[in-house]
Image: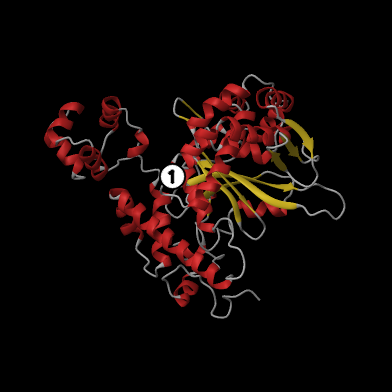
Amino acid sequence: MTKSFMGVRLRRLREERGMTQAALARALGISPSYLNQIEQNQRPLTVPVLLRLNGAFGLDVQLFSDAEEARLITDLRAALADQGAPAATAELRELASNMPGIARAIVAMQARLRETAERADLLAGRLTEPQAAATPAAFEAVRDWFYDRRNHVPELETSAEAIGSALPPGRMAAGLVDRLAGRHGIRIALDADSLRRFDSGARILHLAPHLNEGQQAFQIATQLAFLEQGETIARLSDDPDLASDAQALLRIGLANYFAGALILPYGAFLQEAEAVAYDIDLISRRFGVGFETACHRLSTLQRPEARGVPFFFIRVDRAGNISKRQSATDFHFSRIGGSCPLWNVYEAFSRPGEIVRQIAQMPDGRSYLWIARVVSHGRGGFGAPVKTFAVALGCDLAHADRLVYARGLDLKNPELATRIGPGCKVCERPACPQRAFPMVGRPLAVSIAEARFAPYSAAPG
């Protein structure tokens, strides 16, 4: 644990519980003067005191972790940049560290403002057309919902694991078909016109004929989520902080989460992942799922009493559009202006079939191990459209030695790390040769000069 000054967070916790300094000091077995110094950031919050807090109140120690700071700082920078009010990193760090509630409120206000602007633009440009089912802001809200829970939903995990553990790994489809028929009177029919469609009147679940056994199991498990976990999903998605379109998206996301947890049961999946040093190809073959599905599930293994490596997971297309983004920890994904072109997730497109490795360092000095590979989705056949994505999985360098992908890499040499950032518009690296835009709030001429470009070489060609 680093030397962390968490006085404001501790004081807020004490006030929320209606305790005086003297009462909290007695509960922690320390003197009131020592507690006062901690609250005033004159003394750091030490591990022994943190453990006493956990013992006395059963707190999640993550409450006093600085791991979320990096992401919050990036979100703050982007929110202020949207308003044309860039702030110094030191100021952002102070706000994120000592007043995270205020920082999140600023980010939330800017998100609501951006959503309002997007809806206004949509209404102005499409008055005669039906409105889209969900706005970009709704997708961001759902992503934030999962992020706030570290991409782990225990309410669904237990039920899913109970079903999945009773079925053979990688060959669950037959058992799930029997469950669907025996418990719900639903039969399966193949339908080339839809991936999954449930006819409640006829009690038929239509599935696309091109799905393999693992994909069929996932689609059946998704339908079981709505049938057997409907109340839990409704309760979790009934969040007053979410708009109606975001709540609808969240219901789908929770059903998909349950399906993944069912076909990849937590205990068995984590045990296999640890046994093969998180070799994704071996894990995929063991459970009969694709590379992307295995990566996504790895990013959810955050059960408090049995944690896996805290991964971040992302899927992008060639244009840099992020279609999936999940995180069990603090990696600062960009919300505006795209992501960093030096990130290996883009190099993967030029090396299909390979797993590309990269040690990457963000501007705040945090380093990560990333792996990326290209995946494709499509029905096949000549002339049939195929979707191609790059899927990436990353973790803090502190966990990298648990991964097979770290073999042969010098994890302790910071000079080998690629300097990446959260996206040009919010990245403070002044001398990056790959910069596409100046940092918001920084004059273009200054950015070009700092990047050591000649006056007429700022644009390619």
Image coords of residue 301 (percent x, y): 53, 32
Q: Residue sitting at 12 percent across and 33 percent down?
A: 22
Of residue 355 and residue 318, the one placed in the foreground of this image is: 318
Q: Residues within 10 Å of mark 1 (few under 14, many from 20)?
A: some
Of all residues, the one furthest to the bottom in this rendering is 456
Q: Residue sitting at 18 percent across and 45 percent down?
A: 40
Kindly identify the amino acid type of the residue bearing the numbered disc 1.
Answer: Asp
Image coords of residue 284 (percent x, y): 69, 33
Q: On the image, which quarter does residue 48 sit in?
A: top left
Image coords of residue 169 (percent x, y): 68, 24
The quadrant of the rendering that contains the C terminus is bottom right
For this view, does 272 lie left or right of residue 413?
Answer: right
Of residue 265 and residue 49, the one placed in the foreground of this image is: 265
Is the residue 322 above or below the residue 158 in the image? below
Q: Residue sitting at 18 percent across and 32 percent down?
A: 24
Query: Is there any visible trace of residue 114 in the rendered image?
Result: yes
| Residue at numbered disc 1 | 239
Of all residues, the one furthest to the right in this rendering is 382
